[in-house]
Image (cartoon, rainbow, N blue to C red):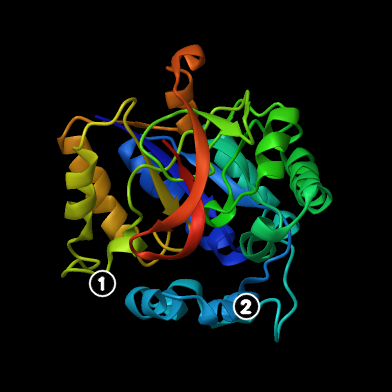
């Protein structure tokens, strides 16, 4: 069993509080993970407009958004100005790399990207990705080599830019196995390592699963064989905070099963890209999460 851990860091609080907690937990288990950072302003409060999205209110009710994110974070970009995560959190981000974990780009402005990218043109997309790349370069003093889209939200321009920027691979979609995306009929040179497992917040509150037992569901899903193992997406604001005890149980369960736990880069380094399937990107919904997102096609 191979498990790649991908940590999406969405907010300033997640950066300053959730990331250090995850580093301590990962050290306990001697595992390394891939941390993908939001690098610009924290405008989490602007997500309030998602209240009109089908399924959003039910997810909020199941996962207790206020307790996970905190009142202050939920006011950023509305009643409170959005703090710049890259400026406030640079030291924490560098500590992740210093501890031997992989780092990469999640987004520049998480809410702006997640709620806008599907409707935006090439110029807008390039501007947002260039801003993220510039902040990443300033913090780490080298270019990013991987990208994982906020909310699994992408457009065709973003996929093409990943190739132009020379990213070794990306993890922007949901799916079952590594593949080479075909965008508008053209084969990319940037492979995708999709998230293969459901996230904890997608399962909690459904069919009797709760914070105390949801790790059992994820462990069972992990045992479903997939080529090259599984990619499990965590969130610094969830698994790094209130759901930290749940993640600890999950790591214990994987260790008991002899799982090889590491970064998405570890998985990429095992791949023969020439033999990966060439598949389109499609857009659709998945259980437990509201809205449409990028999916591995067939």
Q: Which residue is mark 2?
A: 45
Depth check: 161 or 216 in front?
161
Q: Secondary structure at mark 1?
A: loop
Query: In the shown orientation, is residue 59 left or right of residue 75?
Result: left
x and y percent of residue 293 in the render?
51, 55
From the image, which quarter does the C terminus lie in?
top left
Is residue 59 visible to us here? yes
| CA distance separating discs 2 and 1 | 24 Å
Q: Which mark is residue 136?
A: none
Q: Which mark is first along the chain, 1 or 2?
A: 2
Horizontal relation, residue 196 to residue 34: left or right: left
Label total for image: 2
> Who's the residue at 22% across and 45% down the image?
221
Residue 205, x across and y down, in percent: 25, 72
Disc 1 target residue: 205
Residue drawn at x 27%, y 58% as measured from the top left: 246
Relative height, residue 216 to residue 68 (above, below)? above
Specify the quadrant of the image occupied by residue 232.
top left
Q: Which element is circle 2 on?
A: helix
Is residue 101 in view from this perspective? no
């Amino acid at each position: 069993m191979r498990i790649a851990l991908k940590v999406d860091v969405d907010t300033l609080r997640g950066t300053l509080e959730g990331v250090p907690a995850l580093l301590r937990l990962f050290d306990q288990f001697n595992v390394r993970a891939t941390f993908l950072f939001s690098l610009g302003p924290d405008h989490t409060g602007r997500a309030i407009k998602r209240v009109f999205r089908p399924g959003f209110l039910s997810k909020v009710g199941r996962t207790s958004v206020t307790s996970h994110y905190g009142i202050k974070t939920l006011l950023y970009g509305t009643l409170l100005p959005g703090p710049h995560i890259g400026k406030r959190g640079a030291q924490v981000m560098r500590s992740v790399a210093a501890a031997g974990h992989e780092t990469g780009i999640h987004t520049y402005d998480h809410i702006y990207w997640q709620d806008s990218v599907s409707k935006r043109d090439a110029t807008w997309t390039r501007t947002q990705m260039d801003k993220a790349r510039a902040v990443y370069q300033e913090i780490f003093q080298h270019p990013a080599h991987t990208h994982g889209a906020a909310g699994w939200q992408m457009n065709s321009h973003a996929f093409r830019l990943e190739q132009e920027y020379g990213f070794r691979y990306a993890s922007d979609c949901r799916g079952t196995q590594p593949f080479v995306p075909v965008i508008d009929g053209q084969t990319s040179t940037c492979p995708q390592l999709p998230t293969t497992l459901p996230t904890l917040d997608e399962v909690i509150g459904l069919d009797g699963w709760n914070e105390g037992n949801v790790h059992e569901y994820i462990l069972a899903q992990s045992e479903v064989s997939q080529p090259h193992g599984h990619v499990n997406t965590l969130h610094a604001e969830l698994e790094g905070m209130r759901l930290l005890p749940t993640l600890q149980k999950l790591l214990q369960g994987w260790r008991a099963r002899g799982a090889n736990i590491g970064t998405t880069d570890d998985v990429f380094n095992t791949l023969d890209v020439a033999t990966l399937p060439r598949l389109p990107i499609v857009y659709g919904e998945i259980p437990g999460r509201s809205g449409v997102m990028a999916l591995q096609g067939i």
